[in-house]
């Protein structure tokens, strides 16, 4: 990933490349925990063990720092998608969806705060930062769109499937789990499997006209 505007990786500047990475790590954690507005450059510098002025050797502004973090989050998701694609390309449709759901959740829960900060911070980020990030977000979403379109072309999901809406529903389910799922107490594999099953087959495998009728007493309440 390209360096953010104003960033330097010359080892001669304070902290050098290791210092830059330390700033990114601490800032991603603080943005995730406190939010962008409530996190100051001074607080990030303190967490990184350096003077506030030293941050400007690496990043021109707090916006530039946030942009670098959000792009890093997208990079992690893209790499996870590509790995899942390579692993499952010759599998059936359900197995492919399962691999990608697991990969996306792993990116959220198992690869540090960058991806989580992206999900929770993007919509409240300054408009200039969002504008810089949108092309990368769109490219990642397009990868999922192509996956679903390929499954339609292979007749593994219905031709009438609303691709865009289906992708948004799945993304909503995966990304919102950051608010309630505890990966240290629950099984991410089991969660991914449940989510895949509900996305792939719905809550029932039966066609609507074969579902049992609701109790008439329920309808009259």
Image (cartoon, rainbow, N blue to C red):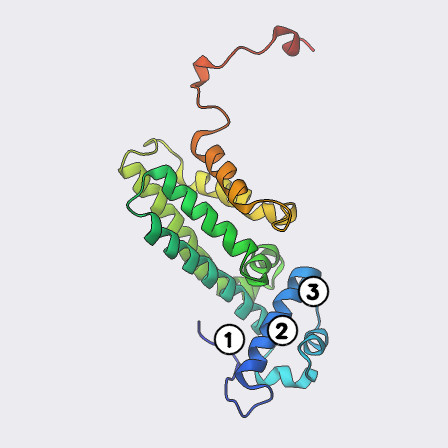
Seen in the image, is 127 located left or right of residue 87? right
- Residue in front for this viewpoint, 9 or 181: 181
Regarding mark 1 in the picture, which secondary structure is present there? Answer: loop
Q: Label 3, on which residue?
A: 37
| Mark toward the start of the polypeptide (2 vs 3) | 3
Left or right: residue 115 compared with residue 210? right
Q: Secondary structure at mark 3?
A: loop
Mark found first going from the N terminus, 1 or 2: 1
**Contact check, label 1 and label 2, Cβ < 8 Å:** no
Q: Quadrant of the C terminus?
A: top right
Image coords of residue 108 (percent x, y): 54, 54
Q: Residue at x 60, y 70 (%)?
A: 25
Lateral position of residue 23 relative to residue 152, left or right: right
Q: Residue at x 53, y 10 (%)?
A: 213
- Which residue is denoted by mark 2 in the rendering? 62
Judge by depth and name the residue closer to the eye, 180 or 152: 180
Q: Marks 1 and 2, how far apart in space?
A: 11 Å
Q: Earlier in the sequence, mark 1 or mark 3?
A: 1
219 lies above or below 187: above
Residue closer to the observer: 134 or 41: 41
Residue at (27% x, 37% y) in the render: 154
Looking at the image, residue 159 lies above or below residue 113: above
Query: Where the N terminus falls, by quadrant?
Result: bottom left
Q: Please say if the residues under marks 2 and 3 sit with CB atoms less than 8 Å apart.
A: no
Residue 4, disc: 1
- Dot 1 surroundings within 10 Å: few (below 14), some, or many (20 or more)? some
């Amino acid at each position: 990933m390209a360096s953010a505007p104003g960033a330097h990786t010359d080892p001669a500047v304070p902290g050098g490349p290791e210092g830059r990475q330390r700033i990114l790590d601490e800032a991603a954690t603080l943005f995730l925990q406190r939010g962008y507005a409530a996190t100051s450059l001074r607080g990030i510098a303190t967490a990184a063990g350096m003077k506030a002025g030293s941050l400007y050797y690496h990043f021109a502004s707090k916006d530039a720092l946030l942009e670098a973090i959000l792009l890093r989050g997208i990079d992690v998701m893209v790499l996870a998608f590509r790995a899942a694609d390579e692993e499952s390309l010759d599998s059936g449709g359900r197995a492919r969806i399962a691999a990608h759901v697991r990969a996306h959740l792993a990116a959220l829960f198992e690869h540090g705060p960058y991806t989580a900060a992206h999900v929770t911070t993007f919509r409240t980020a300054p408009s200039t930062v969002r504008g810089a990030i949108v092309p990368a977000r769109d490219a990642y979403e397009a990868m999922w769109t192509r996956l679903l379109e390929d499954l339609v072309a292979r007749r593994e999901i219905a031709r009438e499937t609303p691709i865009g809406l289906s992708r948004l529903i799945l993304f909503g389910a995966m990304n919102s789990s950051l608010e309630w799922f505890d990966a240290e107490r629950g099984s991410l594999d089991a969660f991914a499997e449940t989510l895949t099953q509900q996305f792939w087959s719905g809550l029932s495998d039966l066609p609507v006209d074969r579902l049992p009728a609701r109790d008439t007493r329920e309808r009259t309440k």
